[in-house]
Amino acid sequence: MTKEQLFEQIKIKKSFLCVGLDSDPVLIPEFLNKYEDPVFEFNKRIIDSTKDFCVAYKPNIAFYEAQGTKGWDSLEKTLDYIPKDIFTISDAKRGDIGNTSNLYARAFFESMNFDSVTVAPYMGKDSVVPFLEYKNKWVILLALTSNIGGLDFQTKRLQNGDFLFERVLKKSLEWGNENNLMYVVGATRAELLTKIRAIVPNSFLLIPGVGAQGGSLENVVKFGMNSNCGLLVNSSRGIIFASRDEYFAESAKREASKIQQEMETLLRERKII
């Protein structure tokens, strides 16, 4: 999916919502266990109830890998079920030496046909570039994450005064551009979005941490939105586990619709739609 196609979906749906499919078998409603593939049945109902309100789905690969081959089957069926006009994110956080990254890229972009994959930049250029060689595919680079441990390295000052995350952003622009690079920026770091936008003004940012983790949608938009929206705001637990009873899909729909309405208001205020 191209940048233009993604922005078109944002305008059509009046939303920049990404739904995280962190589908933990321990947390899904118990009645689904009677199905042959409970995780896929859960995901299918979540997708059916939220697809009109979101522009992206983000399966966190760990929840599927942990189930072995059964989990991979659930993931493939889920990916096939997602409507083709919705952006797909493999939240795999890969990043290794070049030949290994090449195989990771082949796995997620060829074998599974995701639109994008999250990549850790710590090992540098040769760990990222193999993912960037695919046309109309995206690297979503970890830049400034919302977890507490992110502060261990990402906000350390370098000798030139930059934060480490600023160095990551600047260096990444030697490898890719706004048409194949996005960045993960936690909503709980919204006050630093101004620094990020100074370096990557036109790039899309994937923003986790709104809702359950305490991030503010209004602050994310205030500091991070650009003229083409430039944001994908993720909600996982707040939507998919809004309830854990037989009406979980209806609860997910209600939460996704509520967020979409907030996003529509914010998009209209900024005359993006």
Image: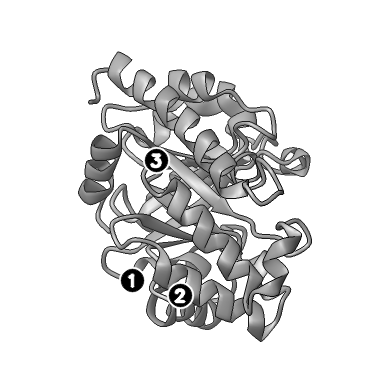
**Residue 171 visible in the snapshot:** no
Query: What residue does disc 3 label?
Result: 53
Corner quadrant of residue 213: top right
Q: Is residue 260 above or below residue 52?
A: above
Q: Disc 2, disc 1: CB below 8 Å?
A: yes
What kind of residue is marked 3? Phe
Numbered tag placed on residue 133 in the rendering: 1
Q: Quadrant of residue 144?
A: top right
Extreme residue toward the top, this view: 269
Q: What residue is shown with label 2?
A: 105
- Is there any visible trace of residue 175 in the rendered image? yes
- Residue 61 drawn above or below residue 2: below
| Disc 2 from disc 1: Cα separation | 9 Å
Looking at the image, which residue is at 45% across and 46% down?
Answer: 50
Badge 2 or badge 3: first in the primary sequence: 3
Mark 2 lies on a secondary structure that is: helix
Report the quarter where the N terminus lies. bottom left
What is the number of the mark on residue 235? Answer: none
**Between residues 98 and 35, which one lies in front from this camera angle?**
35
How many numbered tags mark residues here?
Answer: 3
Q: Position of residue 39 (x, y in %)?
A: 63, 68
On the image, the x and y values in percent for residue 166 come to: 53, 38
Q: Earlier in the sequence, mark 1 or mark 3?
A: 3
Badge 1: residue crowd in 10 Å (few <14, some 14–19, many ≥20):
some
Tag 1: residue type?
Answer: Glu
Q: Where 192 falls versus 233 (above or below)?
A: above
Can you give x and y, in whole percent of width and height, for residue 189 in the image?
62, 29
Mark 2 or mark 3, which is nearer to you?
3
Q: Residues within 10 Å of mark 2 (few under 14, many from 20)?
A: many
Q: CA distance from mark 2 to mark 3?
A: 29 Å
- Residue at the spot 35% in from the left edge and 32% down from the top edge: 201
Q: Amino acid at mark 2?
A: Ala
